[in-house]
Image (cartoon, rainbow, N blue to C red):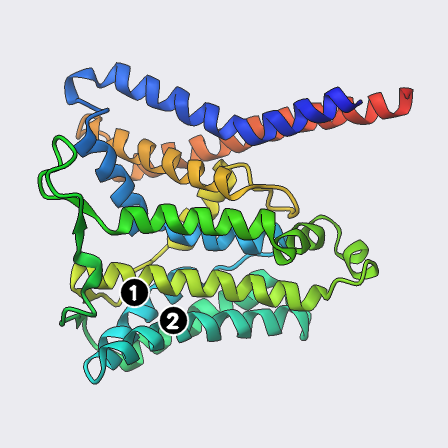
Amino acid sequence: MKLLKQAYHSLYSRSTILAFLLLVIFASFIFQDKNFLTANNIFNILLKAAKNGGFLALGMTFVILCAEIDLSVGAVFALSGVVMGLAGAYNPWLGIVSGLVVGLISGLMIGFMVTKMRISSWIASLAMLFALRGVIQIIAKKSVVIEGDILTFAKAKILPEVIPGMTSGISILIPLLFIMTFLCMYVSHHTRFGMQIYAVGGNCEAARMMGINVDRIKISAFVCCGLIAALSGILLASSSGSATLSAGNTYETYAIAMCAIGGVKLTGGEGKFSGTFFGILIYFIINTIFTYLPTSISVHWQSIIMGALVLISVAVQSEIFGRIQFHRKKAGKTI
């Protein structure tokens, strides 16, 4: 039984990494003529991940581990950038703080509706999505220009001319994505809050009986998700020099897909931030592969293919995990 348990956790933590490695090998072999593994292409994939929902997937992981969902992250992503631009016209630090407050308030409100009003997180976050999109249209009629050295800090480049093929340097968004990933990994594995998240997601009632304040943990998870979404929106607006009203549209679905690919169970209590990170990489590697395909394959077909790949990857992981858990239970009965 102990051996089966070790095998389960080993495969659980490494299946997404294995899928990532196989995908990289496949892509580099098929697209040899396009230099898939060049430094420039690798950092372009990482930059695309940092700009287009990679941070959101990390924030979403907090909520999913609690067996909840947050559909408002795309709207928070957009509104935080707009608020930063508008408030930043008066004071740049006020703009950054105001953008983060958007995520804080959104997380608190959704958490309150879920825990105190007993509203499904799907409905609560969907309502928040519509409300925030409406607020964006009310406070801004067009894209907001982001100006000033402080507000455009995310345009910075690091390590210029150090890495071959990257003479312009690496966008600061890439190391920030790595830092956020390691920070989330640390919180989930080395803090009381992280352990309580897994307990709440695994069995809410059992966690309550253990003395865990379930409502507080869920609200905190929504706040973490909202703050990370707001930070992501601020970073994109800062790096691009403008905050568009439609930014982050459908990004919530991307975030959920990345989490699912990374092995985070939507039923809660199972998953790792390292898995989410590799799920992010897998998603954007597949997205990059689409750019190498013939132009005759339309964007609509690409969406269909992406959906099928997400479904297959989740189904394969569920089948593997289901079989191992079955054998674990069988072994336990025999012992």
Residue 304 visible in the displayed image: no
Cα distance in 3D space between marks 2 and 1: 8 Å
Instruction: Identify the residue at horizontal 63%, vertical 63% (top origin).
Output: 218
Q: Looking at the picture, does residue 309 appear above or below residue 273?
A: above
Q: Which mark is residue 152?
A: none
Q: Where is residue 312 drawn, in percent x and y?
A: 50, 29
Identity of the residue drawn at 26% across and 68% down: 245
Q: Position of residue 40 (x, y in %)?
A: 17, 33
The residue shown at (75%, 62%) is 212
Position of the N terminus, as image quadrant, is: top right
Q: Name the residue type under label 1.
A: Ile
Residue annotated with mark 2: 100
Left or right: residue 194 versus residue 246 is: right
Residue, far bottom: 90
Please tell me in which quadrant of the rendered image residue 139 appears: bottom left
Q: Is residue 133 visible?
A: yes
- Quarter-of-image position of residue 165: top left
Rendered image: mark on residue 234: 1
Position above or below: 302 against 65: above
Q: Are marks 2 and 1 in contact (CB under 8 Å)?
A: yes
- Residue 268 in the image, given as x and y percentages of width and height: 64, 48
Q: Secondary structure at mark 1?
A: helix
Q: Nearer the viewer, residue 322 or 2?
A: 2
Residue type at mark 2? Answer: Leu
Left or right of 167 on screen, residue 70: right
Q: Bin the neighbour count of mark 1 within 10 Å (Cα to Cα): few under 14, some 14-19, many 20 and up.
A: many
Q: Residues within 10 Å of mark 2 (few under 14, many from 20)?
A: many
Q: Residue 70's spot in the image, x, y percent?
A: 51, 59
- For image coordinates 33% across by 31% down, the residue present is 286
Q: Find numbered disc 2 in the image and state the secondary structure of the residue it sits on.
A: helix
Say left or right for 62 vs 160: right
Which one is in front, 98 or 187? 187
